[in-house]
Amino acid sequence: MYVEKKNSPKQILGKIRGLINPPNVQVKEISPSVKILRDVHIPTRDGSYVSANIYMPSHAGKFPVFLSLHPARKDVLCKDGYMHIQFRFARQPGTISFSNETSFEAPDPDFWVSNGYVVINIDKRGFGLSPKGSSPQKFFDQDEIENLYDAVEWAGIQPWSNGNVGLLGVSYLAINQYKVAAMQPPHLKAIIPWEGVSDLYKDWFYPGGVREDGFTPFFSGRIQQFGYAMDLRKEQTDHETRDEWWQSFVADYEKIQVPMLNCISFASQMMHTRGSDRVYKLAGSAHKWLYTHRGGEWTAYYSTEVNALMLKFFDHFLKDTANGMDEHPKVRLEIREFGHEVKEVRYEDQFPPENVVWTPFYLDGQKKTMSLSYDVTESAPSFDLAKDSLQYTYTFERDTEIVGPMKLTLYVELEGCDDANLFAGIQKFHDGKEVNFDGTYGFPNDIVTKTAQRVALRAVNEELSTPYSPEHDFDTLKPLSQGEVSKMELQLEPSATYFRKGDELRLVVQGRYFISGVKVNQPFTYKRSTVGRCKIHSSAQYRSELLMPVIEK
């Protein structure tokens, strides 16, 4: 069975030290040349306002502007001994450096103002100094989107603005960019949604229809503590399927027409990874770029390389600078062989790359292997959903890259239950030892890729699906009948991994998540199966398979 990796005593001690003094976070004083306007009231269409801090060059002029709106409270800054709690709990495999006027996951105003920009950091309504509404504030709803739209248009006509406005930020500050951009405010000229889910149900709260039970209660509690906010955890449990409530938060991606620089983190699986991939593929913009990586979320965002790329992008579209951005390669692809080092960075015209070969690997339940031939032995091994797993291995005969999402097709039968939550993951072994990769929030012991799927929500929307990417509506529960064998299609999160000749790829299927919820820097956990057994059928009739994007070297 799959054995979860435990933290070593050295890792545990390092985490304790990190809680006290995050070793990789460097906070510097903002330059005295930055002019700061605090608690500026930006009017909104309902007659109210949102509170903003504005950072600008001290000399006169007209500058491009970009904004961020979020519930993290713009005036809560890493200064006077305070450090954002996320930086204490979440390991970052690399140094993060920013000024002491940088809000959580927001752009560093010191860097941007020094490069000729105005930065506006806005408190979401009901948080910080922005006024409360008549009822607890929702998140990513139409009111929030309209507030951000109004702020974009306000910024576009100020005497210090050149009329070109952008949006920039990570996670929450990326998610609300999609619907604003789809509304096409006239002064919005470019966006950088750096890692952000694009479908709250599919990417965050119920990936694969399986309820997330770790980060969501934490986040819901934090936002109620620091602002006038709805009970997001209650809304999650009240809306078990992807109903109209969940659908109302999804943007019309094709209406996103402005230039876009997007980021897919292969580490932020079961959260930002698939959502970022979806937006990049479906956005209607004629000018869009993609940056991929598998490092720390904030390590990458505040890095010198990324700052230079974002500056080049905004300089071109907000300053009309002829800097070659039009000719810049569309996709920066990062390949990892081992978790702690980058194997290769190269540039592609699309993601997944054009030269991938979509190759089915057929599951042989008797041999517990995968084969390129579907002439496998008929079998239907089973496992206890509460405590066991099934594993299938494949040993590479030549050096190979697996780049992109994977599609897992399983023919499933349940015993002792009519529904279950299934989890599938891919491990890599080199010289007989498992290779670990970075995961969400810098978790150091993650696997190559993973996914989840609730059996009763297995129905696939064929019109929206592609041969390698199944799309589910998640709107109708359909439990399995006793003795019924049903086809399930699972989408494993995108990744980019190098396997040498002789390396082993291992597929694991089980009824629980691969990482326990007690990890101090890994808050995500998912509702597990507690009863029954699951059979995986493999035969000429039931072709259970793993479809992988293969590039042989």
Image (cartoon, rainbow, N blue to C red):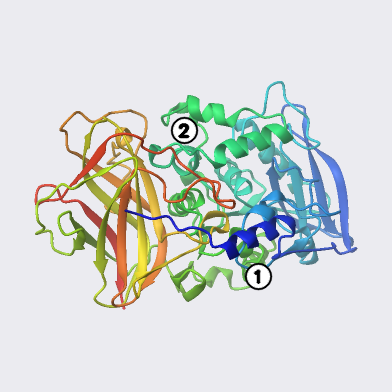
Q: Residue 532: x and y, percent?
A: 27, 35
Q: According to the image, label 2 marks what residue? A: 247
Residue 146 can be seen, yes or no: no
Residue at screen point 75% across, 48% down: 121
Q: According to the image, label 1 marks what residue? A: 308
Crowd class of label 1 (few under 14; some 14 to 19; many from 20; radius 10 Å)? few
Three-letter code for the amino acid on which mark 2 is drawn: Gln
Residue at screen point 71% across, 29% down: 228
- Upstream in the sequence, badge 1 or badge 2? 2
User: What numbered label is drawn on residue 150?
Assistant: none
Residue situated in front as seen by the camera: 82 or 518: 518
Relative to 241, 131 lies left or right: right
Q: Residue 71: x and y, percent?
A: 69, 40
Q: Residue furthest front?
A: 9
Q: Residue furthest top?
A: 134
Residue at screen point 54% across, 58% down: 443
State the SS at label 1. helix
Three-letter code for the amino acid on which mark 1 is drawn: Ala
Relative to 121, 390 lies left or right: left
